[in-house]
Image (cartoon, helix red, strand yellow):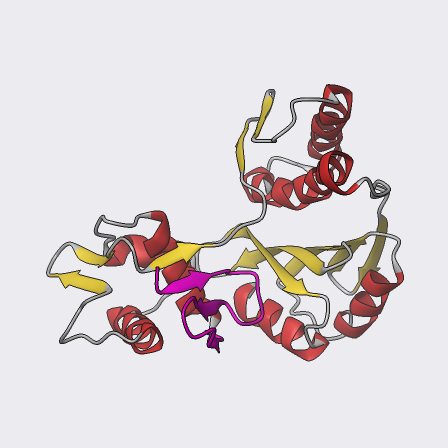
Amino acid sequence: MLWHFNPTAYHQLIHVVTGKVKRIKSTESDTLYLLISNEGHYVTKKLIMHEVWGGRPVSENNITQSISQLRFLLGDSGKEQKIIKTKPREGYMLLPGNVILIQSITSIFDIEEKNVHTIINIEKNTNMLLLNESIESIKFFYRKYVNNKIKNSFLIVFLFIATVNFYNIYNIFHQKKGLVNLSMIIKKEYNTHFHLDRGNASEKLYLYLKDDIPDTISHIFIFKNPDRFYLSCIYYNKTYNQDKAYNISFADNYPFELILGKIREACN
């Protein structure tokens, strides 16, 4: 492997031999994540446009530029295509063995209106009571906050709540630390509802963000664990006349002004 890719890190790319780190823009990061998820298979421009830009009106030149930038960052080029290949009418393919995705916990969700199934891969199959409580907290959140208009958007936000629960489980099995308190504070600023945990760090981030959030964002969720901020936003897409959701996390030392910039860019 030439590169390790962590989409939630400040410097997302790390060269495994030299240790050199590189930071990439959000669109390139999302594009690379999509290519890794389909490693060894071609990804169409239509799918990239839908997954990365969320249906926002962009031209194919935006995709071409993102691929070119990724090639440059990975030490590839359009002429060589030793890492990312292009095939007319089929799209782009990340060749296996060049980039590996780094994630700490793998989770799979299949969430429906009347049935929530959670599949968690954990080394020790113990303490199922805690796991059941985690699932019930997700169900409670679903019943309390989801209405028909934005139901599909909130399915994505469940990942945010699940992060808290997985952190609890991970601590029980591996770190033996205290559990995270799931109680949240809800504050409204202009047209936006902020849902945040009771930690000082989340409060500070909320105070920084509250006056500069676009009025298209109806909900922002903020959770802080010892190492990272986890955020989700529900925003109104004017082009497609529907609500959408976006999840992201940041290292705890990530500058607040850059967090605000990312929210304004991704949730607008």
Between residues 138 and 178, which one lies in front from this camera angle?
A: 178
Identify the residue at horizontal 18%, vertical 62% (top origin).
85
Q: Quadrant of residue 149?
A: top right
Between residues 247 and 14, which one lies in front from this camera angle?
A: 14
Q: Magenta stretch: residue 13 in it?
A: yes
Between residues 24 and 136, which one lies in front from this camera angle?
A: 24
Q: Quadrant of residue 240?
A: bottom left
Residue 72 x/y as whole percent: 30, 78
Please state the extent of the stretch shown in magenta in the rendering.
1-23
Identify the residue at horizontal 84%, vertical 56% (top origin).
187
Residue 204 x/y as whole percent: 84, 69
On screen, residue 200 versus residue 208, left or right, reads right
Depicted 150 relative to depicted 55: above or below: above
Residue 190 x/y as whole percent: 78, 65
Between residues 98 and 162, which one lies in front from this camera angle?
A: 98
Is most of the magenta stretch helix, strand or loop? loop
Depicted 219 relative to depicted 143: above or below: below
Looking at the image, the residue that sits furthest to the left is: 88
Depicted 133 relative to depicted 93: above or below: above
On screen, residue 174 versus residue 247, left or right, reads right
Quarter of the image that includes the C terminus: bottom right
Identify the residue at horizontal 44%, vertical 61% (top origin).
4
Residue 55 in view in this figure: no
Residue 20 x/y as whole percent: 46, 77
On screen, residue 257 versus residue 268, left or right, reads right
Q: Magenta stretch: residue 47 in it?
A: no
